[in-house]
Image (cartoon, helix red, strand yellow):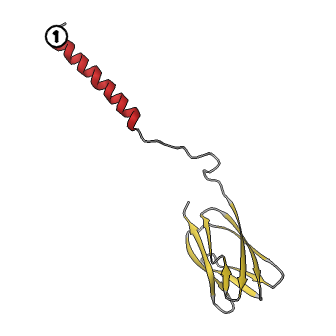
Amino acid sequence: MSRARVRNLVMVLVTLIVLVALFFLLRPEFSAPESSDVGETQEQPVALAINGNTMSPDEVSVTEGDQVTLHITSDHPVELHMHGYDLDEEVEPGEPGELSFEATITGRFPIEDHDTEAELGTLLVQPR
């Protein structure tokens, strides 16, 4: 074999080794999602307290696809109305109410006292 041919072969091998080394050093780290997180509906119980014209917490944040259950207490009779989902729940003082739904629509939705139309808080449904 000629010297030029040997030199070319050595250069190709060195280049190949460098490229392989760079591939392993610079490749992005992929973390596969855990199987329990993929496409699984989460149950989201949320305790809401209504005092006067305020709701605590004033914002309920859930993820699209979650099964949400609002456990509602109030210091006065109230008919809670959730816009976007068009859901209502009447709550009497000392008698907790419950409102369950699947969060299928993303966005921000006002929660109001249906009788007075006072906005009490917000439902935030974030995309999955």
Q: From the top left corner, tell me how far across and down residue 54 is, in percent.
A: 66, 85
Q: Residue at x 35, y 33 (%)?
A: 22
Q: Residue at x 67, y 58 (%)?
A: 42
- Of all residues, the one furthest to the right in this rendering is 94
Residue toward you, 78 or 106: 78
Query: Residue 2's image quarter?
Result: top left
- Specify whether 9 is left or right of 80: left
- Specify whether 72 is left or right of 106: right
Query: Residue 8's image quarter?
Result: top left
Query: Total marks drawn?
Result: 1
Query: Residue 87's image quarter?
Result: bottom right
Amino acid tagged 1: Arg
Q: From the top left corner, tell me how far across and down residue 118 is, in percent.
A: 63, 89
Q: Residue at x 24, y 16 (%)?
A: 9
Query: In the rendered image of this protein, does residue 115 appear above or below residue 31?
Result: below
Q: Quadrant of the C terminus?
A: bottom right
Q: From the top left corner, tell me how far across and down residue 55 is, in percent.
A: 67, 81
Q: Quadrant of the N terminus?
A: top left
Residue toward you, 123 or 74: 74
Task: Indicate the secondary structure of the residue bearing disc 1.
Answer: helix
Query: In the rendered image of this protein, does residue 66 appear above or below residue 55?
Result: above
- Of all residues, the one furthest to the top in this rendering is 1
Query: In the rendered image of this protein, does residue 105 appear above or below residue 95?
Result: above
Mark 1 lies on residue: 3
Q: Residue at x 65, y 48 (%)?
A: 36
Question: Quick one: label 1, few (<14), some, or many (20+) residues within 10 Å?
Answer: few
- Specify whether 9 is left or right of 85: left
- Specify whether 111 is left or right of 45: left
